[in-house]
Image (cartoon, grey):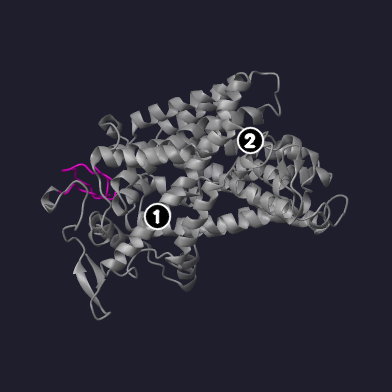
Amino acid sequence: MEYKEKDDNGGTSVQPAYAPPAYAPDAGSDPEKAYRVDHTGTTMPGMNLNNRGEMEGGVKRSLKQRHMAMIAIGGAIGTGLFVGSGGALANGGPVGVWLAYCIMASMVFSMMVALGEMATLFPVAGAFTHYAARFVDPALGFAVGFNYWYSWAITTPTELVASAIVISYWDSKTNPAVYITVTMVLVWLVNFFGARAYGECEFWFSAIKVVTIVGLIILGLVLMCGGGPSHDAIGFRYWRNPGPFNQIAAGDGVIGGRWGQFLAFFSVFTQAAFSFIGTEIVATTLGEAQNPRRTVPRAIKRVFYRLVIFYVLGIFFISVLVPYTDSRLLDASGAGTAKASPFVIAIENAGIKGLPSVVNAVILVSAWSAGNSDVYAASRTLYALSLQGQAPRFFRYCLKNGLPIWCIVVTSLFGALAYLNTGGDAAVQAFNWLYNISAISGILAWWAILLSYLRFYYGLKRQGLSRDSHPYKAPFQPYLSWYGIISFTIIMLFNNFGVFLKGNWKASNFVASYITIPIFAVCWVGWKLLKRTKLVPLDQIDFVSGRRQLDEMEEMDKEIYAPETWYQRLSSYLF
């Protein structure tokens, strides 16, 4: 196998693809001591790969292309879009919420295309934790991995609580702890049956969510144009009255004028970011994906369509159909039921009966689906940390079917935190802190992905390597990545700036909003001091190790899946 390299005259020369790596962590200057970095993310010496690119005793490549496709399309569609968008509309106003979601979609897109290029070249278990260690600093890899693991581990109980609250729409008498327990057991069962079971469940759950949101968007267009029972053409009525932007609250009043409108608009960015958390989750499946260099580029391409269709169009129609002053948004935003969903409010305003229960059922499916994904993503991240020597060795153990059993067991235990929500006010407050911490951790992961990509990009330039031969080439680089990383930095620093406004200060809210950043910094600096790691020099970044098996798999895939007709080639390019 070969790769292209730029020579001093600007041309290209062909080099062997498996030359000894210039740098490998813990290897010193002796390439013979360099640990093996293969595409399953292992850093263990002497581990062999079978003809499917699987490590002996490790996870199995059991996720098919259709699983990857639906996880990419529907993976991040959840209660944040169906319900949480109502709170964002109430805070920012119709134009404010739509602009914020559009800008956030562009930021998430910048992260996903960067992740896509690295992931297709090195589709490893742990993905961006591996990239942070490989392209930046092993200490950053540990910080990202630990941050991402506990982010998803403590997000699991929030989805369990959401499921219980949704069920209370039909049954408000039963103790929520009962439904929390039932949902927890269902989430455990899906994950304990392995990646194949997770892939099948997510395939069907994602299909349900996609069909629902597409149907709601079509219905929104019909209602906007006056096709509802009342034949009232709403048009852009609510953009004019009560107006395009809300004013931000401060103490017992609001901040007026353009400044108050801008602050209200800016406050929506954090809520919008929370709705997009999980978009990157397809990367956690890389170690268990069949034909990763074929499936991953397609999954990344589908992300663009998902961002435009589901989020940009979905938010546009709720901004048109529901006034931001609607009391149901103000009283029920964040409640987690169909009553708080702006889609349902629009349907009720139009006089259509029977749909609230249908949408509520989809919200329940979304919460269950999110719980499954939370445990899956957290357990595979913990598995990758163990392979990299950054978590106890027993987490490497897998059953014969490739299930990292101890990673799932430990991660699943965090589901018990859901019972906090059934306690008193103090317990509920603690639960809300966990939710805020997990959300900011997700944004930190996006930031680290872009930092890793920029190092990846400049490392290639420093070593004179061409990106043209990569299976997927991220567009508009490095400008798009710089745009994303700067934007995410601003959001993290000002994610809850409202707490600093006069009359809004509350120490507990401040801690919940910003504690993630010092935790991340302590992990980074602590591991760096403990292991004496160093920043990987750009001219010594390893772009070779782990590519041979994937190059061979890619050549076989090209022969098997090569498009024969013009419409197959067009479909392959677009999707």
- 421 to 379, vertically: above or below: above
Q: Position of residue 201 (x, y in %)?
A: 50, 39
Q: Secondary structure at mark 1?
A: helix
Q: Quadrant of residue 463?
A: bottom left
Instruction: Report the side of 255 relative to 156 (left or right).
Output: right
Q: Position of residue 34 (x, y in %)?
A: 16, 49
Q: Which residue is mark 2?
A: 505
Q: Who's the residue at 41% across and 32% down the image?
A: 193
Mark 2 secondary-structure assignment: loop
Residue occupying the point 26% across, 57% down = 537
Residue 439 image point, x, y percent: 53, 40
- Mark number displayed over residue 451: 1
- Locate residue 533: give its quadrant: top left
> Is 49 contained in the magenta span?
yes
Mark 2 residue type: Trp
| Image position of 304 with respect to 124: above or below | below
Left or right, 32 with respect to 4, comes to left
Identified by mark 1, the residue type is Leu
Quadrant holding the N terminus: bottom left
Q: CA distance from mark 1 to mark 2?
A: 33 Å
Q: Which portion, as a residue range, is magenta? A: 34-56
**Does the magenta-highlighted stretch encompass residue 2?**
no
Quadrant for residue 262, please give it.
bottom right
